Amino acid sequence: MRIRTITLFATALAASLLLAGCSTAADDTTGGADHSSHSTSTPDASTSSEANAADEMFAAMMIPHHEQAVEMADMILDKDGIDPRVTDLAQQIKDAQAPEIETMTGWLDDWGATSGDGMAGHDMGEDGMMDDEAMTALDDATGDEAARLFLEGMIVHHEGAIDMAETELADGQNPDALDLAQQVIDSQSAEITAMNDILDTL
């Protein structure tokens, strides 16, 4: 009777150890599968710093857009008898956008693209760009008339830049380009408000 009891106990112990081993193996297998699944879902951070076609188009189109804004600012700064609020704003626009032109030109060089690609995307009158007639009228105007033409033209110009920046935020991927797009939206939206306020008092 005692031998039978010992045999039954040994059999039960062996079965228990076998089940425990299977459970451990299953846990290990499951854990490995979970780990593998987690690791494959982690995005490759290196790709986020690369430029895609939207980034290149944003920079290529924004460079000539900024260049025209600087040209408009220079026109108003060269005139006498302009409302100081307008000349201050023109200087602010020039100081902000001239360095951005250099920055974006550097990006295009790094990306193997050219700023000339952007001119094909511009049709005068689209994206807020001033046509030759409007630029000549601004150049010839004086006093409050020049200030008014500058402000009205620059408001439309800024609205075009904001549209371009919003497209970049939607389609671009380069962090620096996305940051600049947001800066354009923030700064130029504020400048539009300021220009409208000045227009109301001219």
Image (cartoon, rainbow, N blue to C red):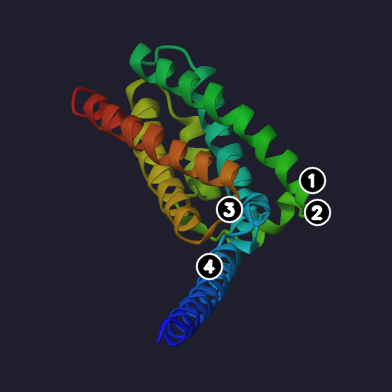
Q: Nearer the viewer, mark 4 or mark 1?
A: 4
The numbered mark at residue 58 is 3
Task: State the residue position of label 4.
Answer: 31
Give me the C-alpha separation between circle 3 and circle 2. Answer: 14 Å
Q: Residues within 10 Å of mark 4 (few under 14, many from 20)?
A: few
The residue drawn where x is 61% and y is 38% is: 67
**Which of disc 1 and disc 4 is earlier in sequence?**
4
**Given contact means CB atoms under 8 Å apart, are the residues at marks 2 and 1 in contact?**
yes
The residue drawn where x is 50% and y is 54% is: 168
Give me the C-alpha separation between circle 2 and circle 1. Answer: 5 Å
Give me the C-alpha separation between circle 4 and circle 2. Answer: 45 Å
**Which of disc 2 and disc 3 is earlier in sequence?**
3
Q: Nearer the viewer, residue 46 or 2?
A: 2
Task: State the residue position of label 2.
Answer: 112
Task: State the residue position of label 1.
Answer: 109
| Mark 4: amino acid | Gly
Label 3 element class: helix
| Mark 3: amino acid | Phe
Q: Nearer the viewer, mark 4 or mark 2?
A: 4
Residue 5, percent from left and from top: 41, 83
Residue 6, percent from left and from top: 46, 79
Q: Is 34 located above or below residue 97 in the figure?
A: below
